[in-house]
Image (cartoon, helix red, strand yellow):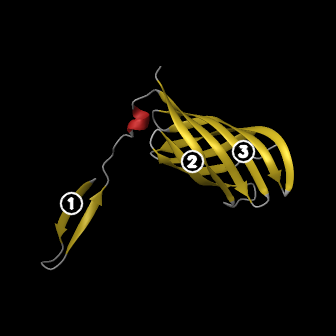
């Protein structure tokens, strides 16, 4: 970041921070990367296990699939599997994905996640559910795999 100091008066001064455009080295050095996700999604009376493979392209756009195992739905124990196609973006440590197609066994959601770590670590986040509220929570582990053409 650049720091510019401008005199306001003789007694006070203001500091203006201007962000510097920096390409994220985690995406720009590769044709694409694969973001692997493993964790759980929950909302009241619902719980599911997730495994995701998300292609992240050099411009930060993302496209992939999340595989789901529904363990609890509306308080009833289940063992149902489904897939959800997602797209969105990864910028730095922030991930936003929108579900746009799924098997009949699950609903599509919108997801906002934050990655903590470098090439691998943990993630946490929330999801906009079919009730159109952010009642879903996500947590788990992630890992990036690099791919050159």
Residue situated furthest top in the rendering: 149
* Residue position marked by numbered label 3 in the rendering: 49
Q: Residue at x 43, y 28 (%)?
A: 30
**Cα distance between the residues tagged 3 and 2:** 19 Å
**Cα distance between the residues tagged 3 and 1:** 48 Å
Q: Position of residue 73 (x, y in %)?
A: 83, 53
**In the image, residue 125 above or below residue 83:** below
Question: Is 149 in front, or is 118?
Answer: 118
Q: Which mark is drawn over residue 4?
A: 1
Q: Residue at x 58, y 44 (%)?
A: 141
Label 1: element kind:
strand
Q: Residues within 10 Å of mark 2 (few under 14, many from 20)?
A: many
Labels 3 and 2 touching (C-beta < 8 A): no
Residue situated furthest left in the rendering: 10
Q: Position of residue 76 (x, y in %)?
A: 87, 54
Q: Say which label, 3 or 1, has the lower sequence index.
A: 1
Q: Position of residue 114 (x, y in %)?
A: 53, 51
Left or right placement of residue 104 versus residue 147 in this view: right
Label 2: element kind:
strand
Q: Residue at x 56, y 41 (%)?
A: 142
């Amino acid at each position: 970041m650049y720091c510019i100091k401008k005199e306001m008066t003789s007694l006070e001064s203001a500091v203006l921070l201007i962000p510097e455009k920096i390409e994220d080295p985690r995406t720009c050095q590769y044709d694409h990367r694969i973001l692997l996700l493993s964790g759980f999604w929950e909302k009241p009376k619902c719980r599911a296990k997730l495994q995701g493979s998300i292609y992240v392209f050099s411009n930060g756009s993302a496209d992939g699939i999340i595989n789901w195992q529904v363990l609890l739905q509306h308080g009833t124990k289940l063992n149902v599997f489904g897939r959800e196609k997602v797209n969105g973006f990864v910028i730095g440590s922030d991930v936003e994905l929108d579900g746009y197609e799924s098997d009949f066994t699950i609903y599509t959601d919108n997801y906002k996640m934050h990655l903590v770590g470098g090439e691998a670590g943990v993630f946490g986040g929330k999801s906009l559910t079919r009730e159109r509220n952010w009642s879903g929570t996500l947590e788990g582990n992630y890992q990036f795999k690099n791919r050159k053409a």
